[in-house]
Image (cartoon, rainbow, N blue to C red):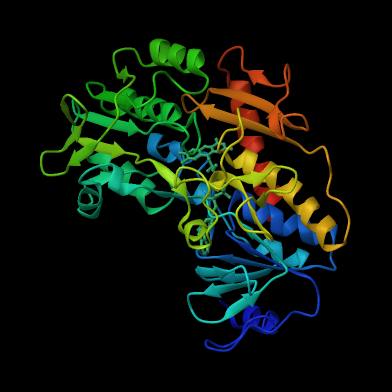
Amino acid sequence: MKRRDFLKIAGAVSVAGCAATTPSKARVVVIGGGYGGATAAKYIRMWDPAIDVVMVERESAFISCPLSNLVLGGSKSLDDLTRSRDGLRKYGVQLVNDDATMVDATKKVVRLARGGDLAYQRLIVSPGIDFLFNEVEGYETAMNSGRVLHAWKAGAQTVELRKQLVAMKDGGVYVLAIPTAPYRCPPGPYERVCQVAHYFRQAKPRSKILLLDANPDVTSKGPLFKRAWEELYKGIIEYRPNQKAIGVDAAAMAVKLEFENVSGDVLNVVPPHRAGDIAVKAGLITHNNRWCDVDWRTLESKAVKGVHVLGDATLSASGMPKSGHMANSQAKVCAAAVIALLNGREPSVNPVMNNTCYSFVSDREVIHVASVHQWDAAQGTIIPVKGAGGVSSARSEQEAAYGWSWARNIWADMLA
Ligand SMILES: Cc1cc2nc3c(=O)[nH]c(=O)nc-3n(C[C@H](O)[C@H](O)[C@H](O)COP(=O)(O)OP(=O)(O)OC[C@H]3O[C@@H](n4cnc5c(N)ncnc54)[C@H](O)[C@@H]3O)c2cc1C
């Protein structure tokens, strides 16, 4: 944390061992400065400047997972997807570059790794995902050896996977194994093989891609992806549904399936996910040891009062993808609800959220899926609105322009 930031929030942070001081104004603490957390922090300050907002984020800069597959394809670098969070300061969001290690919901404090507690009236937790490494035998050993990567959080692993693809011999095999849904970004794996195939077609035309999908079929934009594989990458991508990775052997460079082992030159195994670690520590997990159920009108946790959960960490409602766009949309519903609750008003009884996801099937052509989700009082949950949304009729360069506009707009919406 920089000195000036520390001074700004000094009233809320106590030295280790002392109790957190009670803030004089209403204070919201946000854990996580990604698609959900940064949006919520900014919108609370924009819509009610009387509320103090402190956002705790462990990483120094924001790196977007959306578009990170283009780094693997070679048309973009990680720098193209990296943004500063400093723009949030002009809205009065107080940024703390630290790790939130514990939440005490009774005392209403968040503990920081570098020492000190942050007191809150309402807490918003948007930590993204962590991985269930132990569900894939041998995974941690393989990952620690550097020979098997997931690259499912944009950053160092994305760059390393690109290096492995570049170093791979022409005629080699890249294996991507993906877990059973729900996982972060349903179309992400299918976009990833398009990007790698795009690179192979140009640089290593004898190479192959094996996509091992634990799901029975492509989980998003299926016909559009399959058409791209057939028309753009025929003979490069082999798609195998119902193939769940249960282990990895880094020494043999093999992925273990139920009935066989599959070997490759680059192994990209994405383990099953759950809500980020802090959600576990805060007692927010309600479902299957993985996800956090919320009241979709406020995003308030069903397990811990006064704590709201956003984004990938939530137990997704029917038809709701784990996406950056969805986290951004949830964050606005949550921001409005938190402001209402802190001001003694009823939150909206009819929240609406939406999603759009653009997938780059090459460096120039894109497909999209869109959906709208609305609170249904009879069912007591949020459901897809019939007839709203849909998918592209065909891949196109025009949609690539829309895809880049989407990225620039959503990064500005959350950070600038
Ligand atoms: C390859 C790929 C492609 C994708 N493509 C798209 C796409 O095209 N469109 C789309 O909408 N979505 C896409 N996604 C999904 C999108 O990235 C996620 O759904 C989105 O990031 C979820 O937002 P979030 O706020 O839940 O989590 P995140 O954006 O991951 O933010 C969580 C933040 O919390 C921080 N954090 C976690 N725990 C702590 C702690 N204890 N203390 C401090 N900080 C903490 C993390 O450092 C992180 O910055 C893609 C994902 C991948 C992997």
Residue at (70, 80) in percent of width and height: 8
| Residue 50: x %, y % from top left | 85, 68
Give the image location of residue 108, x and y in percent.
Answer: 65, 71
Looking at the image, residue 294 lies above or below residue 360: below
Q: What is the quadrant of residue 338 in the picture?
A: bottom right
Residue visible at 30% across and 38% down? 269
Q: In the depicted view, which residue is nearer to us: 360 or 322?
A: 322
Where residue 236 appears, as percent x and y from the top left, is 29, 18
**Closest to the observer: 200 or 98?**
98
Q: Is residue 86 above or below residue 369?
A: below
Residue 75 in percent (x, y) is at 45, 36
Please state, as top left, top right, bottom left or bottom right, where the C terminus lies in the image. Answer: bottom right
Q: Name the residue nearer the viewer: 365 or 255.
A: 255
The answer to whether 121 appears left or right of 16 in the picture is right
- Kindly give the residue lying farthest to the left in the view shown: 252
Say which quadrant the N terminus sits in.
bottom right
Quadrant hosting residue 377: top right
To which quarter of the image does residue 110 belong? Answer: bottom right
Please state if 329 lies on the left or on the right of 142 as rendered: right
Tell me if residue 30 comes above or below residue 21 in the rendering. above
Determine if residue 22 is in view. yes
Q: How many marks?
A: 0
Task: Identify which residue is drawn at 80% across, 80% down.
Answer: 24
Q: Is residue 252 toward the left or the right of residue 134 in the image?
A: left
Query: Is residue 416 something that shows in the picture?
Result: no
Residue at image point 56% right, 82% down: 116
36 versus 174 height, above or below: below
Give the left or right position of residue 132, taking residue 210 as reference. right
